[in-house]
Image (tube, helix red, strand yellow):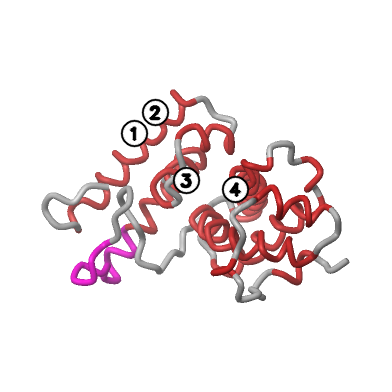
Amino acid sequence: MMEASTLVGQPSGRAGTLMNSSEEWIARARRGDDEAFRLIFDRYARPIISFIYDMVGQRELAEELTQETFVRAYKNLNALRDESKLSTWLFGIAKNVARESLRYRFREDGKVEIEDDRVMEMSDGRLLPDSELLNKELNGVIRDALGALDEDKRMVFTLKIFQQRSYEEIAEITGFSIPKLKTDLHRARAEMRRRIRPYLGVGYEV
């Protein structure tokens, strides 16, 4: 059987022809069908690496942790009881992997810096228009603002705003109660808004 780690960075090019049934992918992968697991990877690698990147702030590290996420998923497919929640399960593994890395880095250097140089989505379902592409100064403000959030708030903010997950999904991924999620998101939005608003156009909301 192929190593799950060989999947990372090697998409099969079949993302456009993926079947709709998570249950079928998982059943086939459990029987040793490597192509089925590759289909799972093709479908979910992009949001997983995006989530981890927003958490840890380093592109190469995010790629390594995404690989670790799918290796763990590959080894523990039999632990997944509700195949319809494959995405939520994968995000849960990614959350644990990212947290382990953050805690290790915190012990090593005492702080975590965000080095995200991409144009970031700052409100539900809306991307900054081309005419408002973030300049270097704003990129720095966003990095600092996201990095200044504590781990729980950054995780909730990333899952809700960037990954567009429902409160119910986030609760399952994080283990937090929905009231806590709403409180953390409100506080994260307020902090991000306070730091970023001076650099954004009038009427734009985080």
Q: Residue at x 31, y 58 (%)?
A: 141
Residue under numbered circle 3: 159
Residue 103 showing in the rendered view:
no
Residue under numbered circle 2: 183
Question: What stretch of residues is rendered in magenta?
Answer: 128-141
Q: Magenta stretch containing residue 138, yes or no?
A: yes
**Amino acid identity at mark 1:** His
Ranked by sequence position, the earlier of labels 1 and 3 is: 3
Q: How far apart are marks 4 and 2 (CA)?
A: 24 Å
CB under 8 Å between discs 4 and 2: no
The dot on residue 87 is: 4
- Compared to residue 106, the image places residue 13 above or below, namely below
Q: Which of marks 1 and 4 is in front?
A: 4
Q: Distance between the residues labelled 1 and 4?
A: 25 Å
Q: How far apart are marks 3 and 4 (CA)?
A: 12 Å
Secondary structure mostly seen in magenta is: helix
Q: Distance between the residues labelled 2 and 1?
A: 5 Å
Ranked by sequence position, the earlier of labels 2 and 3 is: 3
Ranked by sequence position, the earlier of labels 4 and 2 is: 4
- Which residue is situated farthest in the left direction here? 202
SS for dot 2:
helix
Residue 113 showing in the rendered view:
yes
| Snapshot quadrant of residue 43 | bottom right
Ranked by sequence position, the earlier of labels 3 and 4 is: 4
